Image (cartoon, rainbow, N blue to C red):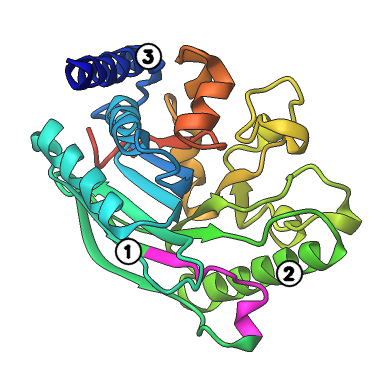
Amino acid sequence: MKKIIIVLFILLTVILWAEELPKIDYDKLTIGEEQTLEVMTWNIEHFPKSEFTVNYSTGIISAIDADIIGLQEIKSDSAFVVLLNNLQTQNPEDKWNGFRANTNEWEMNLAYLYKSSIINVDSIYQIYPDDEIYHKPFPRKPLILEFSYYDQKLFIINNHLKAMPGEKNIVRRKEACKLLDEYIDEFLPQENVILMGDLNDQLTDAPEENSFNVFLDDKQNYYFADWLIAADSTANWSYPYWKYRGHIDHILISNELYDEFENSGSFAKVITIDKFTEGGEDSRYKYITDHRPVVVKLRFTQSSE
C-alpha cells in the first residue's frame, strides 16, 4: 500500500510539474512571410540548458518562422539532432535541414538551421585555422553558409566573439572584426554578405573602446541592420538579463544588400520571447536561454515576387 501511495505521489508531482511549466503565446512571435527572406541569430545558452529547452526552442523557431537561423552555444549534438527532427516533423513543408560545427574545445559550437524548401545551400564551412594566432581573436571559428535564395547568391558568416568587458577582451574582438573585414574584402568583395551572431559588445561604445570601428567607420560598405535598436536605450535589447544588460547580438549587411534593406517591409527586430511567456524573463532564462533572437527581414523585389 505504501509503495502504491509513493508511486501515485510521484505521478501526481510529475503531472503538477508539467502543468506548472510556463506557457508561451507563440502566435505573438511570428515574423516570417513568404515574400521576404528572414535571417535570425540566436544564442541558445549551453544548449540545451534544461530538459525542456529543446521543446521550447522547437516551438519558438516554428513560431518565428525565419528562413535561416544562425545559432551559438550548441553544446549537444544529439539535442541539436532532436531539435532538427522536431522541426522536420512539425513543419514538413519547410524541409528543415541543419549543420552543427564540432571544433570548439568546450563544445560551444556554432550551427545553422534552414528551410531547404526555399534555401539552396551550396556549402557550409569554417574559416581561419584553429591555431594560436587565430584562436585568440576567434575562440569559436566563424561558420559560413553559402546559399542561393531564388536567383540571389548570399553568404552568411555566423560568429560568437569573445565575451566579457576589459581591455584584453576588447582587443580580441577588435582583431576578430579586422580579420572578418579582411576576409570579406579578399574573398567576398562584391557578394551579398550577412555577418551576424553573438558579437558580445555594444555598437554604441566610445570609439576608443568600440570593437566594431572597422565596420562602423566604413559606411560605404557596411551597415548594422540593428543599429537603431542598439542606439535606443529604451528599445528591446538582445541581452536583457542581469547587470550586463545590453544589445550584443548583431546583424551586419554589406552594401550589396542596402537596396533590399531599404525596401518597404524590410527591417530588423529583437524577438521578445519573455514578453509573451508566463513568468517573463525568469522563465526564459531558466528554461531556454539568456539571449533574445535578432532577425533581419529582407525584401528582394525582383526575385521573390
Quadrant in which residue 222 is drawn: bottom right
Of labels 2 and 1, the one closer to you: 2
Amino acid type, residue under disc 2 in the picture: Arg
Front-most of residues 196 and 151: 196
User: Residue 254 at x, y = what percent?
Assistant: 53, 55
Which residues lie in the magenta part?
133-144
Q: Mark 1 points at which residue?
A: 146
Task: Identify the element where label 3 is drawn.
Answer: loop
Residue depicted at x 49% and y 35%: 293
Q: Name the residue under label 3.
A: 23
Earlier residue among tags 2 and 1: 1
Residue depicted at x 47% and y 41%: 259
- Above or below: residue 96 compared with residue 140: above
Q: Are marks 3 and 1 in contact (CB under 8 Å)?
A: no
Work out which quarter of the rendered image holds the N terminus and state it.
Answer: top left
Task: Identify the element where label 2 is drawn.
Answer: helix
Residue depicted at x 47% and y 43%: 42
User: Residue 4 at x, y = what percent?
Assistant: 17, 18
**Residue 139 located within the stretch drawn in magenta:** yes
User: Residue 12 at x, y = what percent?
Assistant: 27, 13
Q: Distance between the residues labelled 3 and 1?
A: 36 Å
